Image (cartoon, rainbow, N blue to C red):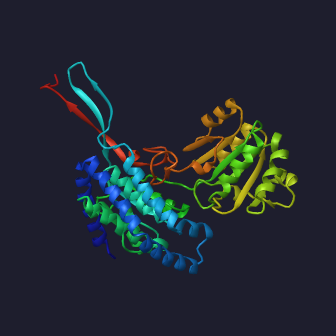
Amino acid sequence: MTNNTDMNALGHAAKAASASLRLASGDQRNAALRAMASEIRKSVETILAANAEDMTAASAKGISAAMLDRLKLDTARVASIANGLDAIADLPDPVGAIEKAWTQPNGLHFSQVRVPIGVIGMIYESRPNVTADAGGLCVKSGNACVLRGGSESVRSNRAIHTALQTGLRASDLPEAAISLVNTTDRAAVGDMLRGLDGTIDIIIPRGGKGLVARVQEDARVPVLAHLEGLNHSYVHADADINMAVQVIENAKLRRTGVCGSTETILVDTEVAGTFLPELATQIKDRCELRGDARAQSIIPNITPATDTDFATEHLAPILNIAVVDGMEAALAHIAHYGSGHTDAILTESADAAQTFLDSVDSAIVLHNASTQYADGGEFGFGAEIGIATGRLHARGPVGAQHLTTYKYQVRGTGQARP
């Protein structure tokens, strides 16, 4: 697959497959998901061998530690991929769900019914699990998908895709329901952004800032964007200090390379003198601390934080610290530097928590919880195709139900409009 004709053919095959999926029963689509999960489990050795080749090649290219962590698969992560497909199968079927229904005085009965979008184009980097997550969510929601993973994960993606297609065949669904762009040629991305001859209905980018920016600038079809996670955790004056230390440790260090990782903590000046030394004792050996002038005066010998630091998604064991004078200063900092992804407040004050939850305009806002809960599985969605940070169609983790739109079905008894 090296030219525009081949790519357009891929799109048309996916379009035809989407018609079959749209009419398939929920039981058939769930059977396919369970068959796909079974094939992933059977193929674990093949998948890990392919991933080992990808890891070797990526290391030789000098790819960052965060990217390598996203790329790496092990037995537990492959098991999680399979379990995620089973979890998606267990979810309620979004296709055909009636959002609301009513009858007009003239006797016409109206129903707003959930239907698939059609063909989802997915462009993503590093994480091979996205191949299964995206494919599974699209099958659940009755959509076909065209997947284009990053060159660094090409072998892993192919191995996972082979297992997914085997599961589709076992359930008598078309293989083209989950199509993988089988080339690392960057021209293929441009073909997808132009819509593959009108066959792609929406593009979802998932990756770094450069990828998302290119998709938003060049796409000729609608885009459901997943922007970088410039996430904040605000330690309020009424925070439980011990709890706050534990939550911040998890929010930063559980996995530093995920988009839900906290990059900046904002600490109320009233508790900074108590909280910051305790946090530093807990994590300084595992995490570089970069602080503003007031943070530096409390924690000796930390790196000065620059404006660039506060605007950077580090995806590494680096934590920015700013000491702020109350809620309004914290909200102003988030509004200036945040990306609208995920932000949290740690406080025992219900009023302060509600003010924060109401005021921060991010897709996910948490109270007394780690920002690493920014994950579709944790929301009960089974998996996610990405975390949308825009304001149209969907925000936050995008699960199967968010990959549907709706139509109106109107039933009458012979009415003619006067």
Residue 179, image x and y in percent?
33, 65
- Front residue of 181/163: it is 163
Report how many numbered discs are placed on residues in the image.
0
Give the x, y percent position of residue 388. Answer: 49, 50
Q: Residue 177, image x and y in percent?
A: 29, 60
Residue at (35, 46) in percent of width and height = 404
Q: Residue at x 77, y 58 (%)?
A: 290
Q: Is residue 369 above or below residue 6?
A: above
Q: Is residue 131 above or below residue 2?
A: above
Residue ID at (39%, 71%):
158
Quadrant the N terminus occupies = bottom left
Left/right of residue 317 with respect to residue 60 in the rendered view: right
Residue at the image position 28 percent from the left and 72 percent from the top: 6
Q: Is residue 220 visible?
A: no
Q: Quadrant of the C terminus?
A: top left
Residue occupying the far left of the picture: 414
Quadrant position of residue 70: bottom right
Q: Is residue 9 visible?
A: yes
